[in-house]
Image: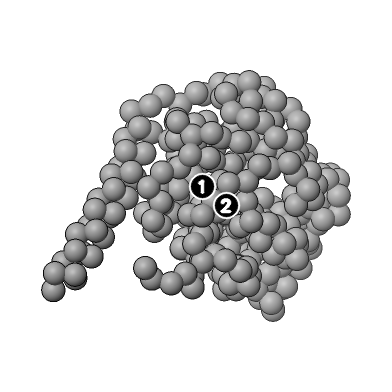
Amino acid sequence: MVGTHSVFLKNSDFYMAHFDFIRECAHRYREGKINMTISPTDTMNDEHYLSAGRSAVDCILKALSATSITSVNRVLDLPCGHGRVLRHLVALFPDAQIDASDLEKDGVAFCEKTFGVRGIVSDPDLTKAPLRGGYDLIWVGSLFTHLRRDITQRWLAHLASLLSDKGIVIATTHGRWCEHIYETVRYISEDKWMKIVSECRASGYGYASYSRQESHRFIDHDYGVSMALPSAITNDIENISGVRIYGYMERGWADHQDVVVYGRPSFDTPWR
């Protein structure tokens, strides 16, 4: 009984430290000031701009509560754009080293100058981007919503390789809810959308490429719109060695995109 009581006290100390950390993060964010300097070239600036960033913070705090993380020292925002979410990450983790990465050099330069973060120009092949690794938290907002499944699979695994020993990835996808709001949010032309839906129903993941006229961020034929069932995304993460799935939230980000949380340590790490 003495040994059992000792283990209980140790676990109790850990849980208190864990909850205190999350509470402190939320308090700092609530009491802090968001830098609302908006780039004149920020194409995401609309009536949902501020609420999308706040919703990202909500997703992050929920994700942290599912882990054993008691500190966040190194953060990556990918793709950072012109700081829609980044400005909130700076307020949430004011003492962390934050990297902001994107293909758009203008956005990276703006984020570096405005928010005092380390800007990293990415690469069309994410596995070749000069990211330093060791991240405790990686926020990936609306990247996998634009990729073929094979690229998504490869990049999900690559991001896992950039984590610290307790680090997590928080990534968003177009889930099954998106089929219901296509009439309101026209992601892509109707014929391509029907292809996406058909593929998703058949295999759990659908994709179609943008035309040059359909996206201001047109890169090549491997950039478009995807939709994925929760089962497809979690299945692909199951195939990544050394990680565990911490959670899945349908419509978790801004009541629109799904959110998946995965990271270290591995699901099969032995009990101590």
Q: Quadrant of residue 46?
A: top right
- Please state which amino acid type lies under the numbered disc 2: Leu
Local crowd at mark 1 within 10 Å, few (<14), some, or many (≥20)? Answer: many
Local crowd at mark 2 within 10 Å, few (<14), some, or many (≥20)? Answer: many
Q: Position of residue 17 (x, y in %)?
A: 29, 48
Q: Earlier in the sequence, mark 2 or mark 1?
A: 1
Residue at 72% from the left image edge and 62% from the top image edge:
154
Q: Is residue 188 above or below residue 5?
A: above
Question: How far is disc 2 from disc 1 in space, using C-alphas?
Answer: 6 Å
Residue placed farthest to the front in the image?
2
Q: Is residue 252 left or right of residue 131?
A: left
Q: In terms of secondary structure, where does tag 2 sit?
A: strand
Q: Quadrant of the N terminus?
A: bottom left
Is residue 190 visible in this depiction of the protein?
no
Q: Which mark identifies residue 136?
A: 1
Q: Is residue 95 left or right of residue 109?
A: left
Q: Position of residue 169 (x, y in %)?
A: 55, 53
Q: Which mark identifies residue 229?
A: none
Q: Quadrant of residue 161?
A: bottom right
Q: Quadrant of residue 84?
A: top right
- Please state which amino acid type lies under the numbered disc 1: Asp
Is residue 157 visible in this depiction of the protein?
yes
Q: Which residue is mark 2?
A: 163
Q: In terms of secondary structure, where does tag 1 sit?
A: strand
Q: Foreground residue, 137 or 251? A: 137
Q: Position of residue 148 (x, y in %)?
A: 75, 62
Residue at 38% from the left image edge and 26% from the top image edge:
32
